[in-house]
Image (spheres, helix red, strand yellow):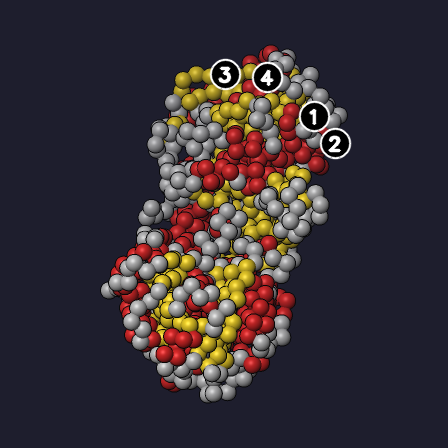
Amino acid sequence: MVGIVGYGAYLPRYRIKAEVIAKQWGSDPVAIVRGLQLNEKTVPGMDEDTITISVEAAKNAVRRAQINPQEIGAVYIGSESHPYAVKPSGTILIDALGIGPDVHVASYEFACKAGSEAMFVAYSLVKAGEMKYAMGIGADTSQGAPGDALEYSASAGGAAFIMGKEKVVAEILFTHSYTSDTPDFWRREGEYYPRHGGRFTGEPAYFRHIIGAGIALLEKSKISPKDFKYAVFHMPNGKFPMEVGKRLGFTKEQIETGWLVPYMGNTYSGSSPTGLAAILDVAKPGDLIFMVSFGSGAGSDGFIFRVTDEITKVQDRAVKTRELLDNNKIYLNYGEYAKFRRKIKLNE
Amino acid sequence: MRDVFVIGAGMTKFGELWEKSIKDIFVEAGLKAIEDAGVGYIDSLYVGAMSSGLFVGQEHLGAVMADYLGVNPVPATRVESACASGGVSFRQAYLEVASGASDIVLAGGVEKMTDGADVTDALATAADQEYEVYHGVTFPGLYAMIAKAHMHQYGTTRQQLAAVAVKNHRNGAKNPNAQFRFEVTLEQVLNSTRVADPLGLLDCSPVSDGGAAVILVSAEVARNLKKPLIRVIASSQASDTIALHSRPSFTTIGSVVKAAEKAYKMAGIKPTDVNLCEVHDCFTIAEIVVSEDLGFFEKGKGGEAVEKGLTALEGGKMPINTSGGLKSKGHPVGATGIAQIIEVYEQLSGKAGARQVKNARIGMAQNMGGSGASCVIHILEVK
Amino acid sequence: MITARYHREVPQRFRLEANKCVSCGHINFPPRLVCPKCKGQKFDNVVLKDEGKLLTYTILRVAADRFSKETPIAVGIVELEDGVKITTQIADVDVDTLQIGQKVKLVLRKIQEDGKAGILCYGYKAVVI
């Protein structure tokens, strides 16, 4: 059966606390921290971007899979913050990891679900017998406009998944995608910060699509929510994934393990993928995992994974997601953060 | 090889020469040298310049300077060896006279650094572009890494580094051509703006404009002109790896050790025979390391030597950088090597005024490029 | 425009590709055509280990224009496990805590940008482990 043979995550070391941002704009930190359940978020270093994050995550995935990188037939990076508007991100990654040049590479973009998209295509190609291994990555260094609600969440990080048929650590049992044209969040060509439809991003967008994909997946699989050990959803803030999980019939306990958002923020294309990586770090053979991503615009990709006996062999081969989240943090003040994120106007 | 003598010298004031172009600067120095030497013509000229292309957008400096100095059609050659360009220019002129190919050669150097170029970036081209500069390292950064290593290995202190600047400013205050004619205190150096830890702004030589030229001649010409016989008794040059990281040690500069060995051998003297030395103190740590590598002090004791006043103009057993050095006199890169020779020449001719070292008979000039990938040494002796 | 010059160094900057002298075993990074130790001209290709220790370092408070928005920048010389020494920035570090002898690992980071619209240039940086 086809599934994940290696996975890895990467989060930058820098952090900013929600209350520091709130104080800057004269907002009430209590509303942010308690209301949206966002305590702090990751911030990329000035020398980090979607490509460098993808490379670190991919190296961790290869370390776990212990495969020859030359056997990877496809590399897809999903992101809404590819450093180039025109030029692929994955080419730098393959040259850094020694993959290819006989390899298919593409950059994906679908707001926050570009990562699950990359995973889905990678999985499909292996399943179709086109190649032995394929890698799907979700990574972002997303930007929220200064003072906008997104500034509390937009963070940086990513996760990489190598799909294959041998020594699979988590089989993919079912998938389902649910998509419609719903303009809840966008960034026009040439614009620096994204725009969003405020509360329109909630019910008609996030909830409708995740629930659409989630119900279809449950029906298709005939597995009941209570039979899953873990569930992970796209995490734009702390509140939404808990709420959508509840509506689909999942409990807080099932969601908590992959619920990294209160201290990671929203890593956009890397959001549910990093959550999945955190779950795989602690999962046991036989565990079922339910995952539904969400990307504005809008759509959701759903997966059902079954963890195999192989998992225990690979878990300790690379750094764990919670270790990246909890250790070696460097806190920034708002000025440093504004400099790091290039929010300050400079002379060229 | 024939004996070669220095019979004339001229330089501009070093500093921010806003009103003067690179041509004005070189021609001023060249004319002064020709006048001082009392020669009616020159057979050829050399001009040392590190990066006129990046600093002022002008290459082909040999032709430019011959034209503006009014000496066409003599052969004119630009010499580049980073910060050792001046010293190497002098060496080329020396070899040309010594070989018998010419009798009267002008060796000059010039740099115009204040015309608005990114000076840090231009100077960095003297390091390994792809494996040092690419990573952001600057020249203060390279010497700062030498300093850190020297401090770590030998216990050299921040105060000892600062003592170099204090001494050189004290000397430079007495030099009418110096860019900084003022003294600085140890506290001022220690508290100066940090540039590359542990080096502060007052540990660094400045960005300068300036030109310098000397006239080298054969024994016959020198005698006919009835000039004091100041002879070049050694000219040596050596190279080391372009990147600092490729060297076995960061606390000794191989090119300096090698060039010094050759120079002492050629001159038939020992380090203790030298009465004064101009060393390439682009940064305070450079003077400490070089003073050890030239054999004046035991390895690791250079910091202590300067702190104890052993290199001072007054009372020092081995006066170093009586001109004020690059630190206080200024460092118009291409001109520096020639300006060092001029200080030695003036000292040996008894024309150093307030900076005069008594009974100076043998003087040395050590000029280096990059983080020490090039080193050129000359020793002059008055008969 | 530094595109061609940048691209030529990619095997070294991304993957630490070096060469090893067949006769004396000296490792060159970047690869060389002549061995500086024994003058040999035959080499095997090798890839360097990405861990090592800090031999010396400095904190740049003043940088060339294209790095000037990133100061303070920690730069050091690292000796990799194979004995090869390289100059590299040290990323993600409180610059006041650096020490000679610290163990470091190389990671891929963006090193510089060729102006506002030019290419992004990547390469190794060290992080303290």
State the separation of the CA atoms marked 4 and 3: 20 Å
Element marked by disc 4: helix
Q: Tell which circle, 4 or 2, labels the residue nearer the N-terminal end.
A: 4
CB contact under 8 Å: marks 4 and 2: no
Left or right: C30 in relation to B26 = right
The verdict on a common chain for dots 1 and 2 is: yes
In this view, B154 is above or below C71: below
Instruction: Report which residue position mark 4 lands on.
Output: A125
Mark-to-mark CA distance, 1 and 2: 9 Å
Whole-percent x, y for residue A154 in the image: 46, 37
Please give the residue where the numbered disc 2 appears in the rendered image: A313
Dot 2 crowding, Cα within 10 Å, few <14, some 14–19, many 20+: few
Marks 1 and 2, the one that precedes in the sequence: 1
Q: Are marks 2 and 3 on the same chain?
A: yes
Disc 2 to disc 3, C-alpha distance = 34 Å
Q: Mark 3–mark 1 contact, CB under 8 Å?
A: no
Distance of label 4 from label 2 (alpha carbons): 25 Å
Mark 3 vs 1, N-terminal side: 1
Whichever of labels 1 and 4 marks the residue nearer the N terminus, that label is 4
Quadrant in the picture for residue A284: top right
Q: Nearer the viewer, residue A237 or B188?
A: B188
Residue A133 is tagged as none
Q: Which mark is residue A178?
A: 3
Which chain does tag 3 point to? A
Q: Which residue is mark 1?
A: A169
Q: Position of residue A163 (x, y in %)?
A: 63, 23
Distance from label 1 to label 4 (Cα)? 18 Å
Q: Secondary structure at mark 1?
A: loop
